[in-house]
Amino acid sequence: MKKRILAYGRLNEDQLAQLAHEFEVQTFSNLASADDPDFRTALAHAHGLIGASLTITPELLDEAPELEAIATISVGYDNYPVEELTQRGVLLCNTPDVLTETTADTGFLLMMATARRAIELAEWVKRGDWQAGLGAEHFGSDVHGKTLGMIGFGRIGAAVARRGALGFDMRVLYSNASPKPELEKELGAERRELDALLAEADFVCVTVPLTPETEHLIGEREFALMKPSAIFVNIARGKVVHEAALIEALEMGRIRAAGLDVFEQEPLSPESPLPHFANVVALPHIGSATHETRTAMAQRAVDNLILALKGERPISLVNEAAWKPA
């Protein structure tokens, strides 16, 4: 009898066919919550799950006694109870690498758009307000030659820094990471304690994963340490930043601008003032949202799940302790 998987992510027809060749597949389109009764019923006989943006709790795992593996179509896995999965012997797989460059593009897009006030001035043109030459009140800031402070220096952080150092002659600082001598040599990057980085950087870009240690890593104290001319960019997770403190920093002019692709609550509440600041570029979490990258992410998840359910080691395994080679 074929093993059974529940698919609730964006998989194309070829990917679904690839899974169906190996397993019995039950699909859930537009699954908004794990509380969906049909999904809960199907969990009882599921050996694998594939999808994203669904919070998996220990209580939910109690309803899936046959579960062997989960393939998330994402790099982040903060919505999965990793320790609980490991204790139950359930493999958790993610999709690093395939979205690194695309997400770094988004980070640099936010840096450029905020520094040069691109969205604000494009709207100014749309309104028909461009009636004469630009005055100093419309000027932006240079990006080239400035100091880029990376909070987090993993794959995505390094890719953002590479764009800055090699493409824009930026000086690169990094923190919240172990020493990276190879990147220091390649990019001339300098390691700093967080406080020193915040004080020196013209652009502060956050790429750390969300963990209990990084939740609200950037708050009122940290914004106060930044230059009034600093531009803050977050392409990590919304909860890494204390959003109320960010709003206050913008209102009080403690920082110049912010480029944001992630928020504490997503979708962003209509009540949030953030999109209404002229000096904020707010995007709807588009970090990896290109046709090419999302297809590649889904394919990595498919490959991970097939390997895991066949008893082979997945390409991208989060909880190594759960892996028991045959």
Image (tube, rainbow, N blue to C red):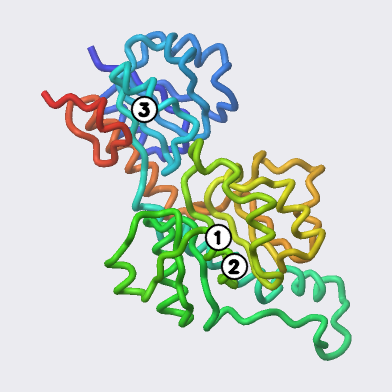
Position in image of residue 221 (x %, y %) = 66, 53
Residue beneath disc 1? 195
Position in image of residue 269 (x %, y %) = 75, 41
Q: Is residue 269 above or below residue 24?
A: below
Q: Amino acid at mark 1?
A: Asp
**Mark 3, mark 1: which one is toward the viewer?**
1
Position in image of residue 201 (x %, y %) = 56, 70
Residue beneath disc 2? 199
Residue under the point 34% across and 16% down: 67
Q: Give how far apart the Cα atoms at labels 2 and 3 are.
A: 42 Å
Q: Give how far apart the Cα atoms at labels 2 and 1 are.
A: 6 Å
The N terminus - image quarter = top left
Q: Amino acid at mark 3?
A: Ile
Label 1 neighbour load within 10 Å: few <14, some 14-19, many 20+: few
Q: Secondary structure at mark 2?
A: helix
Label 2 neighbour load within 10 Å: few <14, some 14-19, many 20+: some
Q: Amino acid at mark 2?
A: Ala
The C terminus - image quarter = top left
Residue under the point 52% across and 65% down: 197
Residue beneath disc 3? 70
Q: Quadrant of residue 281?
A: bottom right
Q: Are marks 2 and 1 in contact (CB under 8 Å)?
A: yes
Residue under the point 32% across and 16% down: 88
Q: Is residue 143 above or below residue 175?
A: below
